[in-house]
Amino acid sequence: MMDTVLQRRESRETFWRTLQTFCATRVVITLVLLAYFSINAFRESQGSNGYAEWQTCLLYLVLALGFGSLSTYVQRRFMLQLLAQLVVDISAISILYIAAGGARSGLAILYLFPLSGAAVLAPLVLALFFVSIVTLILLGESLYQLLYSMADTSPSQAGLYGAAFFAAIFVINRLAAKLIKQEDLATQRGRDLQLQEAINRLVIADMNDGILVVGDDTEVFAGNPAAERMLGMSVAYGQPRYKLTDRETLTPIAEAFFAWQQAAVGHTEDSESSTYVRVKPGDDMGVTRPMTTRDRRRDLHTHLKLRFASVKSAGLSNDRTVIFLQDVSEIENQAQQLKLASMGRLTASIAHEVRNPLSAISHAASLLSEDLVQPTEKRLLNIVSDNVIRLNRMIEDILKLSRKAHTQAEPLQLTPFLSEAVLELRETHKLTPDMIAVGRMDNAQVRFDPLHLREVVMNLLTNALRYASGRPGSIRLLAVSPTPERLELHVQDDGPAITPEVRAHLFEPFYTTSSKGTGLGLYVARELCLNNGAMLDYEYRMDLSGDGRDEPSGRFVITFAV
């Protein structure tokens, strides 16, 4: 048991630091004693004893400096160094104590210094052993004085010193032992905490879900590798590098965070509701391997499910919020495959069961229009014809969904392709030549099925014609390349921007704000883009207004993978 205790003292850094402090204190005490006895040596007429005390202090100082250097540079054999220092301390103090006249000198209090060091650094038995030696020295000196020198000397004073030393050393040793146990417990807790932190980091790093730690001002403090992959940018752990609001690609997450903060005001518990956003990954972490269609789709946009959890602590000046990010793109892909299979069966049924009756109704209406002459009857017949046309258009849109699964992606030059599409639209709708402005897109090339891209562009341009003012340049087509791996096609008109409420349902099937629409045009356009590894979305970007100020404006953005 004793060997184990000694080995622990040998290996613990705390004991070596305490021993070094013990050595530094010894040097200070020795310097004070040296100054004290030096002054007395020059003041007293009989200087022989004074010089002896001065020489003892000088030798004691040299040994103290040696012990200090040894404990600093040779941290081996702790107990041997401690015992050597205690023996030298007690010997030097005993010489000075006896030379100065014993109990009359008042130097007995100096024994408290080495004994206290023994109480802190040595086991209790060893510390009490040194106390016993000091007590015997004090009693021996008192008896010597009583027998040979002074008749009025009493050993009771030495006995009181010994009893006081025993009590003080016992208390100091118990307090030191309690502190050592507390340090052992704190060290163990620290190791457990480090182990748990390492486990947590390993688990978090291996999670498929992303984690972001942000402050109230959207400053990003930490994130795991999954979040970095989803967002396409690196996050320094514990060292905030940017805010969510500083990155355009992270704006949807910042908006969802602010909305959650407003909803959480006045509530004691965090809301369990989730938020879905689409973000475009940044370009901090490039993809170095060949990408498939699914990879390109993921590179162009990521559909994330966000969940927020507030972390409150009294020790933090600002609260932290943990944002959990779950990539639901794979779930969407699986749902897309199931939807295509169901749509194929549905369209086959529609083609046979619905189109034939519609054709019969349309033919009958045409025959009736030749015989009817009353205005009321013609108006009712027109209603029938209009709804037949609307139903037929809806069937055509649904049939396109089944045909879109078969793509023939090939390199396509945007400039000549869009010029032909715009020319066709001008001739069909009798537009002025300068109503649609097409930006220069030299050498802009994408991989996209030409028939699908034509359908998407014509759908967006037709939609823009419905809301544009008709002035020159009221509709604009512009290609933008924010990164070398990404190309965007913007379709914008000067009509009123779509409200966020409508934008939330913009690409849902059968959702429309027009009485003449079927609600499938934008849905089909987005599905065609997704099937070609691209992404269609409605975004708000900053544009210069007429007075030179930046104002948000909406536009449809097709993001291609170059």
Image: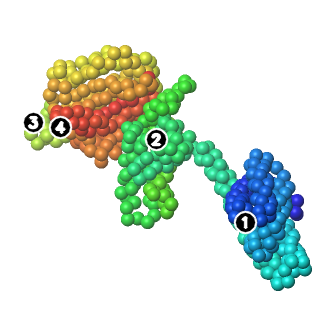
Residue holding disc 1:
44
Q: Earlier in the sequence, mark 4 or mark 1?
A: 1
Q: Earlier in the sequence, mark 2 or mark 1?
A: 1
Name the residue rendered at 36%, 57% in the picture.
262
Q: Which mark is residue 241?
A: 2
The residue tagged with tag 4: helix, strand or loop?
helix
Q: Earlier in the sequence, mark 2 or mark 3?
A: 2
Q: Are marks 3 and 4 in contact (CB under 8 Å)?
A: no
Residue 273's spot in the image, x, y percent?
Answer: 44, 56
- On screen, residue 73 versus residue 398, left or right, reads right
The residue tagged with tag 1: helix, strand or loop?
loop
Q: CA distance from mark 4 to mark 1?
A: 135 Å
Q: Nearer the viewer, residue 5 or 245?
A: 5
Residue holding disc 3:
373
Q: CA distance from mark 2 to mark 1?
A: 73 Å
The residue tagged with tag 2: helix, strand or loop?
loop
Which quarter of the image is occupied by the N terminus?
A: bottom right
Q: Nearer the viewer, residue 561 or 142?
A: 142
Residue 45's spot in the image, x, y percent?
Answer: 74, 65
Q: Residue furthest front?
A: 45
**Residue 278, can we see it?**
no
Labels 2, 1: front one: 1
Which quarter of the image is occupied by the C terminus?
A: top left
Mark 3 residue type:
Val
Labels 3, 4: front one: 4
